[in-house]
Amino acid sequence: MKHISPALLPSTLALLGVVVCCALLWNQTVRFKRSVEKLAEDVRVSLIDLNGKVVYDSAGKDLPNHAGRAEFEAVIADGQPRSIVRESETLHISMFYFARRIGDYVLRIAVPYQAVTDAKADAVHGLFAAVGTGSLIAAALFFFTRRYERRLLRLSSERDLQDRIMEEMRKLERFRSNFISNVTHEIRTPVTGILGATEMLADDTEPLDGNDRAELRNVLTSHSSRLVALVDDILALARLEKAEAEHDASFAPCDVADIVQTAVNLTRPAAQNADIALSFVHKAHDTSPIVRPCDARLIESAVTNLIQNALRHSGSKDVEVCVERTPSGKAAISVNDHGIGIPEECQPRLFERFYRIDTDRSRSLGGTGLGLAIVKHIAQLHGGEVMVSSKPGEGAKFTLVV
């Protein structure tokens, strides 16, 4: 009987693990796809004008006027998103309604509890399969990484080369560990909250009073918004990296001051709610506008992220946004605060994904931890850069040059 060579045994085990992982992933993917397809069939989306008339309904039915329905009236009253649990007037089953005003319309989403429960079950099963799969793949990758490391050490005859290789591997390991830890935490927290609230709302054994339902609806809304924001930021980063790699960017001449003024106007309500004075200064050396080829939407997003970062984390009672022309003709956009400042040792890492100076405080204040990373990639896409200068106790200045 032939035996497997000891040198080939680890490779054979790793290959077998990868095959098993692929089979598990394929099985869970098919099951989850079916569950999501069913959920997509059950989810109902309606677009309603301010008079209650249905402009669009995904079910394609001619529905009556919606002016008398609770979620519609609540959104019209104060413009705030609402989550309401009630029996459907057309389907006569318990539904979770989410309504949000968008301009002159109200977007309403209706989800049956059973569809959510089925999707949740498949998602949990898929999560366990993914954890098992990831463990096997991580073990295989760890084995090959260690083997490659030993080979490099044997081939390297210079001590300084060995030290550099080891340091780079440590950096990659720290980055991998931090990235996995942060992504897991950022996604797990809202998903756990959503699943817990959904299970309590779907549990018929213990009836909930109005206060309990209101609290659970608030949990669903807040965690859903947090998850959507995280997904949006991750997708934004992916699009920016793809555009950078493929040099796929379409720019047009834009007045940078107008873009910054729009970003300031969008963030002014948040500043007022936080009792922070937000001002805009155009430091032009001449009367001509600062016109630069750029993507106005992306520049507005970058400036908005910088302002929101100052409003949330600086602790300053006043934030100043400035625009000026650099000697080379580029536009320099700076966001200045007079808050707690940033330690010097933390500044080089500020634009890393999910990096936070004070993890607990940053998460409690909101944000996904991706805002400054998005700003960095927008600057690079425009052939510019983003910088920070700060001293503890003297505030901070973020400068975007495009």
Image: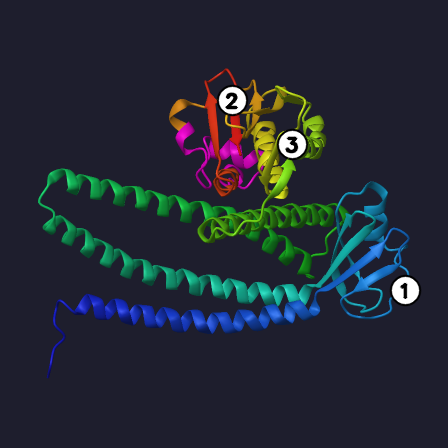
| Residue displayed at 84% across by 68% down | 90
Task: Say if 126 sits above or below 302 in the image.
Answer: below
- Secondary structure of the residue carrying tag 1 is loop
Categorize mark 2 by other alpha carbons within 10 Å: few (<14), some (14-19), many (20+): many
Residue 7 shows up from this direction: yes
Q: Which mark is residue 260?
A: 3
Categorize mark 1 by other alpha carbons within 10 Å: few (<14), some (14-19), many (20+): few
* Nearest-to-viewer mark from 3 and 1: 3
Q: Is residue 43 left or right of residue 361?
A: right
Structural distance between the alpha carbons of marks 2 and 3: 19 Å
Give the magenta-colored segment's residue range: 347-373
Q: Is residue 39 left or right of residue 6?
A: right
Structural distance between the alpha carbons of marks 3 and 1: 44 Å
Of marks 2 and 1, which one's residue comes earlier in the chain?
A: 1
| Residue displayed at 62% across by 64% down | 117
Task: Say if 172 sits above or below 349 in the image.
Answer: below
Q: Which mark is residue 396?
A: 2
Of marks 2 and 3, which one's residue comes earlier in the chain?
A: 3
Q: Residue furthest bottom?
A: 1
Q: Which mark is residue 64?
A: 1
Q: Position of residue 119 (x, y in %)?
A: 59, 66
- Secondary structure of the residue carrying tag 2 is strand
Residue type at numbered disc 1: Pro
Q: Does the magenta segment cover residue 349? A: yes
Q: Position of residue 385 (x, y in %)?
A: 47, 34
Structural distance between the alpha carbons of marks 2 and 1: 55 Å
